[in-house]
Image (tube, helix red, strand yellow):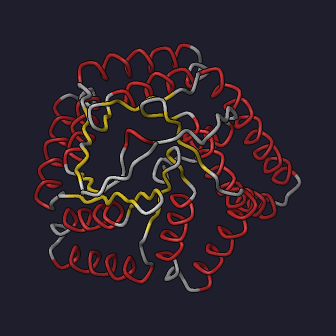
C-alpha cells in the first residue's frame, strides 16, 4: 500500500558526462554522417542522446533514452520528403514567374508545421525516456496545440512582438502541463507579463553596461524557466530551484570560448559537458513525493517524424 511522505526531502540531480568520452562519440558520428551523405544522422542522434541521458542522474539513478536509429530514420525520410515537396513547389512557382506566391507558401508551411513538429517531438521524445523503468509521456492534443499556436503567433504579429512573451510562456505552460512522469504531473507557473518585464530590463541593462549585464540576464531567464517548474502527485509536490549566478555563467562562457578558440572547435565536447554539469549542479529539488512509489501510466510511441522535422527546423530551444 502506497504511503505519502509527510516530511519534505531533497532530491539530487547530477550530470556525470566526460569530455573525452563524448568527444569519441561525436567524432565517430561526424565521420559516419559525412561518409553516408547524412543518412547515418538518425543513428548518430541515437548514440548522442543515449549517452547524454545515461550520464544524467536523479538520486544516483540514470535516465534512459530508448529511441532507436531505425525509428528516427523512418521519421528522417518522411521529414526529408516533406521538405523536398515544399522546395519543389517553391521552385515551380519561381519558374512560372510567381516567386512571391512561392515564398508565401513557404512561410505558410513553415508556421503551420511548427506546432506539428513540436507536438510530434514531445510525444516521441517523452515516450522514449524513462527513469528506473518508469516511462515519461506527453498527452498534448495536436489540433488543440495547432489552434493555440497560430492564435498566439497571430497576436504576436498584430501587437508588433509585444505578445511574444505570452506566446513563449503559454507554449511552455501547455507543453510542460501535458508531460507525465508515470503518475506524476508537471506544471509550469510562469506569467507572460513577468517574462516581458524581465526581458525589457535585461535588454536595457545590457545596452547600458555595453553587454556586461547579458550574463545576468541569461541567469534570470534560466531562473524563470526552472523556478516556475513543479511536479505534482495527488496532494504531494516537488519544487525546482536554481542557484545559477551571473558571475558563474560569465566564467562558464569565457572558459568555453577559450577552449573552442584554442582547440579550433575540437573542444566542443568538453564545452558541452561543462555546460551540462554547471546547469545540473545548480538545480535543487525539494518536495514530498516518494520517488520509490511512482506508477507506470504511459505507453511507447515510435513515430519520430516530428522529432526529425524539429531537427531540420533547429528546434532544440523548444526541447
Horizontal arrangement in the rendering, residue 178 relative to residue 213 (left or right): right
Q: Residue furthest right?
A: 96
Query: Considering only vertical position in the picture, is 286 above or below 200?
Result: above
The tally of labels here is: 0
Q: Looking at the picture, tell me which residue is in the foreground, 284 or 214.
A: 284
Query: Considering only vertical position in the picture, is 307 above or below 250?
Result: above
Q: Which quadrant of the structure image shows residue 72?
A: top right
Q: Residue at x 18, y 57 (%)?
A: 244
Q: Residue at x 39, y 60 (%)?
A: 236
Horizontal arrangement in the rendering, residue 207 relative to residue 80 (left or right): left
Q: Residue furthest bottom?
A: 159
The percent position of residue 210, horizontal first and vertical second, equals: 17, 71
Query: Considering only vertical position in the picture, is 83 above or below 213?
Result: above
Horizontal arrangement in the rendering, residue 246 relative to residue 139 (left or right): left
The percent position of residue 33, horizontal first and vertical second, equals: 52, 19
The percent position of residue 180, horizontal first and vertical second, equals: 53, 50
The percent position of residue 42, horizontal first and vertical second, equals: 57, 25
Q: Residue at x 70, y 54 (%)?
A: 113
Amino acid at each position: 500500500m502506497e504511503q505519502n511522505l509527510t516530511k519534505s526531502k531533497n532530491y539530487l540531480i547530477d550530470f556525470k558526462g566526460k569530455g573525452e568520452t563524448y568527444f569519441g562519440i561525436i567524432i565517430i558520428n561526424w565521420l559516419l554522417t559525412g561518409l553516408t551523405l547524412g543518412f547515418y544522422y538518425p543513428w548518430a542522434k541515437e548514440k548522442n542522446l543515449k549517452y547524454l541521458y545515461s550520464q544524467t542522474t536523479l538520486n544516483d539513478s540514470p535516465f534512459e533514452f530508448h529511441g532507436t536509429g531505425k525509428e528516427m530514420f523512418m521519421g528522417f525520410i518522411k521529414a526529408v520528403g516533406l521538405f523536398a515537396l515544399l522546395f519543389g513547389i517553391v521552385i515551380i512557382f519561381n519558374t512560372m514567374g510567381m516567386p512571391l506566391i512561392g515564398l508565401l507558401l513557404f512561410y505558410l508551411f513553415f508556421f503551420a508545421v511548427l506546432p506539428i513538429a513540436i507536438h510530434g517531438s514531445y510525444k516521441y521524445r517523452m515516450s522514449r525516456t524513462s527513469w528506473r523503468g518508469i516511462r515519461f509521456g506527453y498527452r498534448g492534443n495536436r489540433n488543440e496545440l495547432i489552434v493555440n499556436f497560430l492564435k498566439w503567433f497571430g497576436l504576436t504579429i498584430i501587437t508588433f512582438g509585444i505578445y511574444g512573451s505570452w506566446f513563449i510562456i503559454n507554449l511552455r505552460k501547455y507543453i510542460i502541463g501535458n508531460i507525465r512522469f508515470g503518475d506524476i504531473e508537471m506544471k509550469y507557473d510562469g506569467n507572460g507579463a513577468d517574462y516581458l518585464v524581465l526581458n525589457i530590463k535585461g535588454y536595457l541593462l545590457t545596452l547600458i553596461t555595453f553587454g556586461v549585464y547579458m550574463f545576468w540576464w541569461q541567469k534570470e531567464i534560466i531562473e524563470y524557466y526552472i523556478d516556475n517548474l513543479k511536479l505534482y502527485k495527488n496532494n504531494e509536490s516537488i519544487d525546482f530551484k536554481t542557484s545559477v549566478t551571473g558571475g558563474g555563467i560569465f566564467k562558464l562562457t569565457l572558459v568555453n570560448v577559450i577552449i573552442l578558440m584554442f582547440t579550433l572547435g575540437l573542444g566542443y565536447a568538453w564545452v558541452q559537458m561543462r555546460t551540462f554539469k554547471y546547469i545540473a549542479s545548480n538545480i535543487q529539488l525539494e518536495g514530498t513525493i516518494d520517488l520509490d512509489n511512482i506508477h507506470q501510466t504511459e505507453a511507447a510511441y515510435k513515430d519520430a517524424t516530428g522529432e526529425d522535422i524539429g531537427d531540420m527546423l533547429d528546434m532544440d530551444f523548444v526541447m
